[in-house]
């Protein structure tokens, strides 16, 4: 295994230190662009609906981090499981869950993935192997380790991917899980999405060890820092980690250096960082712009790209329409699904 | 058609805010994601980002305007190819009515007790299985009965496994898992590190993936480290997933007071878990019930909290020698019939209850003793039928009285049999202190048969 790279102060500064990742084929570039655009447009629409009062409670947007889930998903095979925390809309769309069902859950309607009983942070799809959507920070790390335990117990070759943030990385149960995963050689990839802020607290104010790829060092879990704004780098690192797990070598940690453009939740006043910082990442590193630029350089026409954008907008607009017109759950639903 | 930009809400409770600043001018091109304005409330400032592309057509609310209502159109965006002439076509936005606004006014609610929107479904408990006449009864300790239950279910279903601290090579801290490693091997009998929060979560995750874990806590005192995973993950996921993803898992281990181990190792968690919808809570007293109910718990598709008792592990009782003795969860057992007073308890509380019933009989008071066996779902029917007969009730528990299971039983009796009561329900419970270490103080802190006798006599006005 390669030694983890030296910690970089930020995703932005770290860019030049990296060898460039393997090129994508045109089909891969187009797929990555389309999947990332779908998440971005979906999240923009969700933010808009939240502002209109159609979505209640908390609403944590994934804008800026799209390359992480899209790149990782490209490294997985059918049967691999995904689990994450509360910022989960992007993960669901990446696993192929329908925009209609996700948006209708956000508006609390009966056509939502949880029949309107879970909301933004709590959705699941057995069919797509998506195990939530968890509102308790760090809980998904133990649960995701349990998914890997089940794979190991059954002797199949599925890998579980447990996503969590730089904030969750300081929870105790994360390390309890690391210990068991390495002890029992469980096939789990821990993807730490380091977006540099745990709600309003910068990594430097909360973390004694800011190189999250080293967080498994005392358990002998290999780790790697990845440019989480470059979907090609994410996919390449994901493939390496997943291969490690499938080979029965135990868990693997990937620190995805990424950035969230929006606030922690919709009600975030964003006083903890400057607008210039956000603008700089957006301008220099936007994951979608990177792909778009490469495609244009490869002589894909602006019209073709617009067509992708239009297709994605249609899906998102249709989901918003569905989510606002689908009826609320029947009152009898109050009492169902407590026990089976 | 031009698109209207509406005054957004920073939170679901925000009704109005100030339009602090416009960052784009009329006629400027706009891309999706561009910050076009800033709004503020007394709590926070937020940027308004465009979600559509085009040109900023017209600013409808000038900057510096205070108290702009949420959802008021603040600007229009012209799509490619549209001009200012199209502005008139902008549709009036459909205002989202907040749920709070459409709720009936508080005064209407206060008029009379409202019937529930829909009644909570009542669990219908099945009776115990028939034990055919002539069935051999084997005398077993509760420890052995529990071990046999696990072994039988592990033979029956390859998805069942046991994990916990010292369950395998050590053969169980209280020897409940004795012999399981030898029969089933290390793949299915798994020693964990001392890491309750972590292994509870691993167990729940494995259950979400379809396995049927039996998670042993060395004692339920240590499950406090894991209670987040038990409640937030195991109990709630079926509901939060709209019925898609459940969790068939048993959390078991000794609960309640042991002997001389002081406050951190002697607490009854019955009421804690029985509070939570989504969990089933079982607390047996007899060896036969321990076996039959643990088998039912392992087969149950829901998370089950199985509360054992260290003091009872060595107690013996007859267990029917049947190939598959499964007792349905949710049904209380009338252990002793009587007509003067109903005594209701479970687990080790039954020790005091039964001793007290013997004492009371000497004084001519015939107590009906109910072993609840399951705390959730609670068998209200058996309790109520008995109280309708006796008109008097005493609850017995080792846990604290406040918000205890006895309090819940008393409330159900009041709700369902108020007119039948000849005396207020009496509660006998652990004293309202952390468990002391000294032998004499420990005895004082726990309930006793004498206290049960006293309470029963009091409700009988004797």
Image (tube, coloured by chain):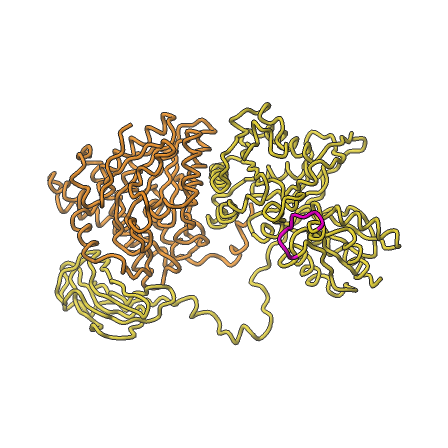
Chain colours: A orange, B yellow
Q: Is residue B343 left or right of residue A173?
A: right
Task: Check residue B204 for magenta coloring.
Answer: no
Q: Is residue B124 left or right of residue B353?
A: left
**Residue B218 at what x, y percent from top left?**
58, 38
Q: Residue at x 65, y 57 (%)?
A: B432
The quarter in which the N terminus of chain B is drawn is bottom left
Q: Is residue B402 left or right of residue B33?
A: right
Considering only vertical position in the picture, is B17 above or below B399? Answer: below
A189 or A117, which lies in front?
Answer: A189
Considering only vertical position in the picture, is B142 above or below B71? Answer: above
**Residue B40 at what x, y percent from top left?**
28, 68
Q: Residue at x 40, y 57 (%)?
A: A326
The quarter in which the C terminus of chain B is drawn is bottom right
Residue span colored magenta: B432-440
Q: Classify residue B391 by image quadrant.
A: bottom right
Considering only vertical position in the picture, is B337 above or below B292? Answer: below
B144 or B257, which lies in front?
Answer: B257
What main secondary structure does the magenta stretch of the protein show? loop
**Residue B402 at what x, y percent from top left?**
63, 59
**Residue B71 at what x, y percent from top left?**
31, 68
Q: Residue at x 50, y 74 (%)?
A: B106
Marks counted in the figure total 0
Task: Check residue B436 for magenta coloring.
Answer: yes
Q: Residue at x 27, y 75 (%)?
A: B66
């Amino acid at each position: 295994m390669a030694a983890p790279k030296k910690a970089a102060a930020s995703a932005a500064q770290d860019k030049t230190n990296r060898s460039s990742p393997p090129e994508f084929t045109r089909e891969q570039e187009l797929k990555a662009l389309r999947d990332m655009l779908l998440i971005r447009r979906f999240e923009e629409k969700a933010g808009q609906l939240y502002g209109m009062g159609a979505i209640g409670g908390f609403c944590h947007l994934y804008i800026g981090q799209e390359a992480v889930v899209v790149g990782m998903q490209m490294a997985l095979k059918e049967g691999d499981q995904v689990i994450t925390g509360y910022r989960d809309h992007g993960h669901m769309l990446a696993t192929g869950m329908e925009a209609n069902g996700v948006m209708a859950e956000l508006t609390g309607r009966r056509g939502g993935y949880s029949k309107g009983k879970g909301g933004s942070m709590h959705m699941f799809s057995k069919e797509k192997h998506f195990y939530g959507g968890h509102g308790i920070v760090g809980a998904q790390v133990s649960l995701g380790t349990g998914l890997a335990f089940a794979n190991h117990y059954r002797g199949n070759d599925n890998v579980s991917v447990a996503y969590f943030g730089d904030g969750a990385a300081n929870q105790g149960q994360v390390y309890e899980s690391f210990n068991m995963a390495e002890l029992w050689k469980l096939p789990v990839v821990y993807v730490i999405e380091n977006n540099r802020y745990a709600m309003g607290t910068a990594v430097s104010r909360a973390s004694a060890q800011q190189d999250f790829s080293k967080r498994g060092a005392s358990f002998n879990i290999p780790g790697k820092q990845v440019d989480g704004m470059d979907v090609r780098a994410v996919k390449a690192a994901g493939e390496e980690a997943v291969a490690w797990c499938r080979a029965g070598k135990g868990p693997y940690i990937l620190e995805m250096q990424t950035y969230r453009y929006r606030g922690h939740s919709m009600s975030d006043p964003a006083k903890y960082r400057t607008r210039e910082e956000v603008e700089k990442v957006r301008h220099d590193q936007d994951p979608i712009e990177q792909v778009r630029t490469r495609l244009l350089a490869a002589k894909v026409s602006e019209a073709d790209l617009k067509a992708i954008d239009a297709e994605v907008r249609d899906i998102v607009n249709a989901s918003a329409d569905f989510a606002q017109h689908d009826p609320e759950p029947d009152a009898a639903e109050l009492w169902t699904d407590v026990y089976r | 058609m031009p698109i209207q930009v509406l005054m957004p809400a920073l939170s679901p409770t925000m009704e109005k805010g100030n339009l602090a600043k416009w960052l784009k001018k009329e006629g400027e091109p706009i891309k999706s994601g561009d910050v076009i304005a800033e709004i503020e409330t007394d709590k926070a400032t937020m940027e308004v980002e465009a979600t559509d592309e085009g040109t900023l057509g017209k600013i409808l609310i000038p900057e510096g305007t205070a108290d702009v209502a949420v959802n008021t159109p603040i600007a229009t965006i012209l799509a490619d190819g549209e001009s200012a002439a199209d502005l008139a076509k902008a549709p009036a936005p459909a205002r989202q009515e907040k749920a709070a606004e459409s709720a009936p006014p508080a005064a209407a609610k206060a008029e009379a007790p409202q019937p529930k929107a829909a009644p909570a479904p009542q669990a219908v408990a099945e009776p115990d299985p028939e034990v055919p006449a002539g069935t051999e009864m084997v005398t077993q300790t509760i420890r052995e009965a529990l071990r046999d239950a696990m072994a039988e279910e592990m033979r029956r279903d390859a998805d069942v496994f046991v994990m916990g601290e010292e369950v395998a090579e050590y053969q169980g801290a209280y020897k409940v898992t004795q012999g399981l490693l030898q029969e089933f091997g290390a793949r299915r009998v798994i020693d964990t590190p001392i890491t309750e929060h972590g292994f509870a979560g691993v167990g729940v995750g494995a259950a979400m993936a379809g396995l049927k874990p039996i998670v042993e806590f060395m004692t339920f005192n240590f499950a406090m480290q894991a209670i987040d995973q038990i409640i937030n993950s195991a109990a709630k996921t079926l509901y939060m997933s709209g019925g898609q993803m459940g969790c068939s898992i048993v959390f078991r281990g000794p609960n309640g007071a042991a002997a001389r181990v002081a406050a951190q190792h002697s607490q009854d968690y019955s009421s804690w878990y029985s509070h939570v919808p989504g969990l089933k809570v079982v607390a047996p007293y007899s060896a036969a019930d321990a076996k039959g109910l643990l088998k039912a718990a392992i087969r149950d598709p829901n998370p089950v909290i199985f509360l054992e008792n260290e003091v009872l592990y060595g107690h013996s009782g007859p267990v029917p020698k049947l190939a598959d003795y499964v007792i349905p969860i949710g049904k209380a057992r009338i252990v002793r019939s009587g007509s003067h007073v109903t005594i209701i308890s479970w687990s080790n509380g039954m020790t005091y209850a039964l001793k007290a019933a013997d004492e009371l009989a000497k004084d001519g008071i015939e107590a009906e003793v109910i072993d609840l066996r399951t705390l959730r779902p609670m068998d209200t029917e058996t309790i109520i039928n008995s109280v309708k007969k006796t008109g008097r009730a005493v609850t017995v528990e080792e846990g604290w009285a406040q918000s205890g299971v006895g309090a819940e039983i008393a409330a159900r009796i009041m709700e369902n049999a108020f007119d039948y009561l000849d005396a207020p329900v009496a509660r006998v419970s652990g004293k309202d202190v952390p468990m002391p270490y000294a032998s004499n103080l420990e005895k004082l802190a726990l309930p006793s048969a004498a206290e049960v006798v006293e309470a029963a006599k009091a409700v009988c006005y004797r």
